[in-house]
């Protein structure tokens, strides 16, 4: 009986400790991330105010508020891409098989489209390894014209949200590479997905036709 | 001596209760159960079948999020009202089982699990309370526990129970949370009440995308892919995997809800 009491007393003390820990812990966690979020959303306000009255833009992926870095290290939100059509794919630089093929397909499209209102966008799914420097190197290796091509790297949350809205599936493998969907997206001027091209090494004429549906702006 | 110990004990119990009551207000992490972690074996091993994912300890909501809890969230976050939600984030059936923006109505129970919820809405809810959605690995780790053991996936009776639920159509109002019993971890309704969102539902690559170099058929759900699967007998797990792979982030359906988790580490490191 006495033993039992001592044990339960000890357990209580430990519990008390844990509870205190939780209380103190939670208070501290709150401050930092919250401020960041607030800042971002106030930055985003002009965008969302404009979008509000426009039903068509309810589908714009530029509503995502995540912050990205370009290959030049510049911080942007997706809404900064507004104004031009984007031919866009999610890839990672260390990818040895699928991504080079996707980029190759995108370059094929680039060679067949001669208009200034279309840009090319690669978004990395490898937030750990694809730093702006790594992306710059990647662009160099693949001879991408950085006037027309943009490369973005972001955090895991931003990547998962973007993947989620595009229906892009991916999974990190134990060796650090990724299994992923192969999709080339056509985004209109407002960031609405106008067309998706699935698969690798297929005729890209469908993408070109999609773009040529509209006149150059 | 004995009396003193008793007194101390009572005092301690009292203060713990008081503190817990207070932590309810500050910390929505109340009503969460600690899962001591473990190993999750994904259904489809990509590069070898022995692949195991180590899951670190975490807290998980004892119950799925209820209609009344979600209503409170919507009141505090008007952006997530039914009439305000953007299509990108929630399709037209978002909260369609509620009477109006801020009224539950007769079709749902206040203490029933909230459904007709998109991934973005579920995610926003968890983040508002400083939590997050569970990963597939975390969810499955908790879900494989039967009522008396942490791994019931080899228990055919348990598997059969789950399958029976999967084959039963939902005809009436969804029951209150807690009505399907608790498992080994003290977590309720992991099976038998609703389907639940996971943070990385998009990692269920069962339609041939997993390896672009291996042709479309290799990982098809019913085809050669299942030959590669790690657990032939666990049909419910196959069904969940197939269900997840069919989801999109703005989808909402009448039997899909969610619960949240929280890192154990995050709770501890912030001293």
Image (cartoon, coloured by chain):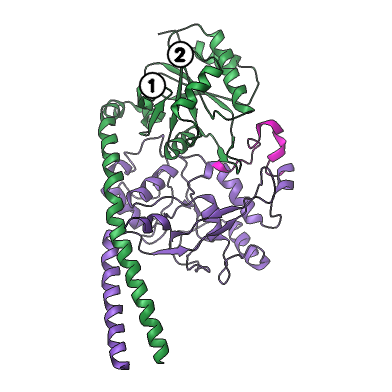
Chain colours: A green, B purple
Q: From the viewer's perspective, tell me whether residue B257 is left or right of residue B15.
A: right
| Callout 2: SS | loop
Give the position of the C terminus of chain B as an image quadrant: bottom left
Which residue is the site of mark 2?
A148
The local crowd at label 1, few if under 14, some if 14 to 19, many if 20 or more residues have their Cα within 10 Å, is some
Residue A64: x percent and y percent? Answer: 38, 33
Q: Quadrant of residue B233?
A: bottom right
Q: Which chain is indicated by disc 2?
A: A
Task: Kindly tell me whether residue B180 is visible in this rendering.
Answer: yes
Badge 1 vs badge 2, beta-carbon distance below 8 Å: no
Placement of B103 over or under A133, stated as above or below: below
Disc 1 target residue: A81
- Helix, strand, or loop for circle 1? helix
Region of the chain picked out in magenta, as a range: B203-223
| Separation of marks 1 and 2 at Cα, in angstroms | 12 Å
Front residue of B183/A94: it is A94
Residue B184 appears at what percent x and percent y?
53, 69
Pointer 1 or 2: first along the chain: 1
Quarter of the N terminus of chain B within the rendering: bottom left
Q: Nearer the viewer, residue A216 or A143?
A: A143
The residue most toward the top is: A114
Q: Nearer the viewer, mark 1 or mark 2?
A: 2
Residue at the spot 34% in from the left edge and 43% down from the top edge: B82
Describe residue A38's horizontal placement relative to residue B264 as left or right: left
Q: Which residue is found at the position 59% from the left and 26% from the top?
A: A99
């Amino acid at each position: 009986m006495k033993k039992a009491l001592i044990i339960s007393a000890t357990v209580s003390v430990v519990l008390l400790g844990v509870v205190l820990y939780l209380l103190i812990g939670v208070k501290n966690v709150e401050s930092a991330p919250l401020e960041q979020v607030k800042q971002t959303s106030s930055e985003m306000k002009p965008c969302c105010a404009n979008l509000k009255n426009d039903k068509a833009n309810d589908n714009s992926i530029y509503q995502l508020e995540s912050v990205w870095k370009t290959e030049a290290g510049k911080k942007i939100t997706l809404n900064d891409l507004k104004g031009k059509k984007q031919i866009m794919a999610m890839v990672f630089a260390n990818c040895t098989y699928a991504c080079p093929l996707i980029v190759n397909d995108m370059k094929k499209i680039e060679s067949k489209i001669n208009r200034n209102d279309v840009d090319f966008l690669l978004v990395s799914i490898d937030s750990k390894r694809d730093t702006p420097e790594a992306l710059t190197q990647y662009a160099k290796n693949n001879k991408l014209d950085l006037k027309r091509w943009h490369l973005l790297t972001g955090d895991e949350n931003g990547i998962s949200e973007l993947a989620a809205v595009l229906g892009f599936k991916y999974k990190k493998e134990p060796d650090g590479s990724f299994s992923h969907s192969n999709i080339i997206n056509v985004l209109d001027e407002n960031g609405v997905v106008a067309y998706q091209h699935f698969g690798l090494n297929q005729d890209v004429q469908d993408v070109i036709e999609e773009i040529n549906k509209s006149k150059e702006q | 001596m004995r009396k003193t110990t008793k007194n101390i004990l009572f005092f301690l119990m009292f203060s713990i209760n008081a503190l817990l009551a207070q932590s309810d207000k500050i910390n929505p992490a109340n009503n969460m159960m600690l899962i001591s972690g473990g190993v999750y074996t994904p259904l489809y091993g990509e590069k070898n079948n022995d692949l195991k994912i180590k899951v670190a300890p975490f807290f998980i909501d004892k119950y799925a999020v209820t209609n009344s809890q979600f209503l409170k969230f919507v009141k505090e976050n008007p952006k997530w009202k039914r009439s305000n939600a953007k299509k990108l984030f929630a399709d037209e059936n978002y909260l369609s089982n509620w009477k109006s923006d801020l009224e539950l109505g007769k079709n749902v129970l206040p203490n029933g699990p909230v459904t007709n919820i998109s991934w973005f809405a579920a995610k926003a809810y968890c983040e508002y309370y400083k939590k997050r959605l569970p990963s597939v690995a975390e969810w499955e780790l908790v879900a494989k526990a039967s009522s008396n053991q942490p791994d019931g996936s080899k228990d055919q009776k348990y598997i059969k129970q789950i399958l029976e639920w999967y084959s039963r159509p939902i005809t009436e109002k969804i029951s209150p949370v807690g009505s399907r019993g608790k498992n080994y971890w003290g977590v309720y309704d992991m099976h038998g009440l609703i389907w639940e969102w996971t943070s990385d539902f998009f990692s269920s690559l069962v339609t041939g995308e997993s390896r672009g170099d291996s042709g479309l058929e290799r990982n098809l759900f019913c085809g050669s892919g299942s030959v590669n699967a790690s657990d032939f007998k666990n049909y419910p797990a196959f069904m969940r995997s197939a269900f997840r792979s069919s989801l999109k982030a703005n989808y909402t359906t009448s039997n899909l809800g969610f619960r949240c988790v929280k890192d154990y580490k995050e709770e501890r490191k912030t001293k």
